Image (cartoon, rainbow, N blue to C red):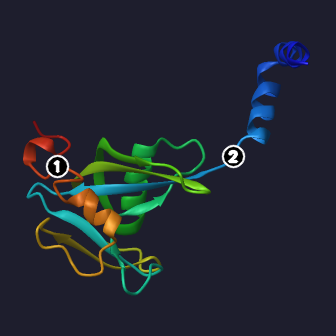
Amino acid sequence: MKRVVARLWHAMRGSVQWRVLWLANAKFMVGVTGVVRNDAGQVLLLKHRMWPESRPWGLPTGFAKRGEEFPLTVVREVKEETGLDVTPGRLVRLTSGYRLRVEVAYEALHTGGTLKIDDFEILEARWFDPDELPQGLQDSHRQLITPEGTATSPAARPGTS
């Protein structure tokens, strides 16, 4: 039986093989988070309208679109939610094991733009010092901001050396 399946597999063309693989495997959404810092080392936090009232503060976050490179998801989401421009940096976390999603987080450096929040999703956007984070911040995001999560030294920020 194994030989028959192997021969059948080899007889298929690449596009047919990909379709079979797509049908046979799990589908995931990819949540992408940006740990956005400015030149002063402050981190950009957003008060999200759709998040629980007890934990509304968090980093810019959104889902990757089909075919989108994850660092570019950070750039797009920050621009859509705040009007600000960023340059993505290093990958700081990749988390799997969820039922329907995986999550990735990247550092990002604020490079310009004018703050104009998307008031459908975002109630407020503010820069915070890493040692003065607000109450109601998502725990997973706090871990990305603190020294145990994402480095806060200027040498560790994207675009600096």
Asked whether 77 or 6 is in front, the reply is 6
Q: What residue type is labelled 1?
A: Ala
Give whichever of discs 2 and 1 has the lower sequence position: 2
Counting from the top left corner in percent of width and height, residue 161 is at 10, 36
Relative to 46, residue 3 above or below: above
Spatial CA span between label 2 and label 1: 34 Å
In the picture of the structure, the residue carrying the numbered disc 1 is 151
Q: What residue type is labelled 2?
A: Ala
Residue for point 55% across, 56% down: 98
As drawn, which residue projects farthest toward the front?
A: 1
Q: Residue furthest bottom?
A: 53
Q: Which quadrant of the structure image shows residue 12?
A: top right
Specify whether 22 is left or right of 54. Answer: right
Which x, y percent locates residue 96? 50, 49
Asked whether the viewer can see residue 39, the reply is yes
Q: In this view, does 69 lie to the left or right of 114?
A: right
Instruction: Residue 30: give x, y in percent of width and height.
Output: 53, 52
In the drawing, what numbered circle is on residue 84?
A: none
Residue 115, visible in the rendered structure: no
Q: Name the residue under label 2.
A: 26
Considering only vertical position in the picture, is 25 above or below 79? above
SS class of the residue under badge 1?
A: loop
Of 105 and 73, nearer the camera is 105
Q: Which residue is drawn at 39% across and 52% down?
A: 74
Figure quadrant of the N terminus:
top right
Q: What element carries label 2?
A: loop
Viewer-nearest residue: 83 or 48: 48
Q: How many marks?
A: 2
